[in-house]
Amino acid sequence: MIGKTDIAVIGLGGIAQIVHLPILTKLNMVNLKAVAEVNKNRLNTIAAKYDIKHKYTDYNELLEKEKLDAVIISTPTNTHHQIAIDCLNAGKDILIEKPAAISLAQIQEIIDTAKKNKRKVMVGMNLRFKPDAMLLKSIVKSGELGNPFYVRCGWIRKKSSKRDWIMQKKYSGGGVIADLGIVLLDLAVWLLDFPEIKSVSVQTYNNETKEVEDSAVGLIRLNNSSVINFEISWSFHSEKDSFYLDVFGTQGTAHLNPLKAYKKIDGSKIDYAFDVQSKNLKNLFKKSYENELKHFIGSVRNNVKLTSSIEEAMQRTILLKGIYKSAQLGKEIQL
């Protein structure tokens, strides 16, 4: 592709304001051409802040009038499906914020529509793009840790949005599992190179919520005998946000946040040192979104294969459905 990539953002909630718009407006290869938002006051305020002249309350009008290469969809989860279908039929590549859609049937229709129109669909799984996570992936893949047999991970923080829709299941599709769990577990299975999942056993809690869960703990068994143990919460008491992931291998161990790695050699423990661990941890999260957007734009511009495709999102959603089923039935279930 010659020249800049023309992009529009549909949905101007927290993730668009905090992540997408600030990053996109600073990327030289991008022309942030238009935005759409049903809340007219928010639309006018945000468009004025970023000097975006083409603004719409109806995204269909945006698709009809604007010549675009790609669209970022950052609306409530229950709206993703229809907006994605309309964008794909309009010939646009798309990046959808997670979760991709409410149901497996909706995701399958997005996959089918993308194939029909020969378009790309990426789903936002930004943790894969954290600089320390990418380095950890290369360590695991190199075999330095031996055979990874156990991943322990967790994320304790306030909910990602203050808007009411995230607390209503018909709009969000779920609570903290759909908010934090899906991207944390995506990171875990990505680090392990997507092993087949055998079973899940999960317990959820509604300590401060009604319709959706605010906390969950669980165990995921993989067909290669390795295990993922996780805890996620909006309500567990913590002096500050807590995010961690540990990979235990037969020859070594590695940790995220900050990145550390140890290898066993002749009975001794060798400590790896990484410059990335000295960086501000919050900046690593910000960098993950920048890397994610650059990857998406690079794929649109240069026809590079996508990381975190809609097909992979289908597998994460199958896992999500299994987790909710296990919690509902109160027992371990086979996938």
Image (cartoon, grey):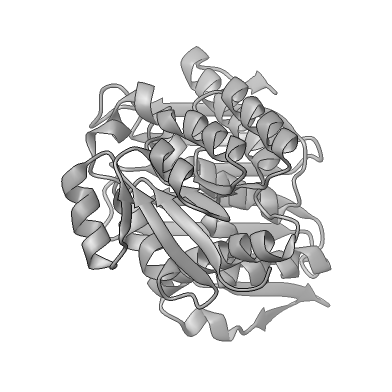
Q: Is residue 191 above or below residue 328?
A: below
Q: Nearer the viewer, residue 28 or 334?
A: 28
Say which of 124 and 111 sits in front: 111
Vertical side of 211 occupied by 254: above or below: below
Q: In this rendering, would 72 be left or right of 266?
A: left
Residue 34 relative to residue 329: left or right = left
Q: Is residue 150 above or below residue 271?
A: above
Residue 279, given in percent of the width and then of the height, sits at: 46, 82
Q: Is residue 35 above or below residue 49?
A: above
Q: Please tell me which residue is depicted at 27% across the width and 38% down the height of the picture.
A: 38
Can residue 316 be seen by looking at this rendering?
Answer: yes
Residue at 31 percent across and 43 percent down: it is: 234
Q: Quadrant of residue 197?
A: top right
Q: Residue furthest front?
A: 65
Quadrant (top left/top right/bottom left/bottom right) for the N terminus: bottom right
Point 48% across, 75% down: residue: 27
The quadrant in which residue 23 appears is bottom left
Q: Position of residue 7 (x, y in %)?
A: 49, 58
- Residue 174, visible in the rendered structure: no
Residue most extreme to the top: 329
Residue 155 image position (x, y, % from top left): 43, 51
Number of residue marks = 0
State the quadrant of the C terminus.
top right
> Could you say where residue 88 lies in the image, as x and y percent from the top left?
60, 39
Residue appearing at x 26%, y 59% in the figure: 47
Choose between 280 and 256: the one closer to the eye: 280
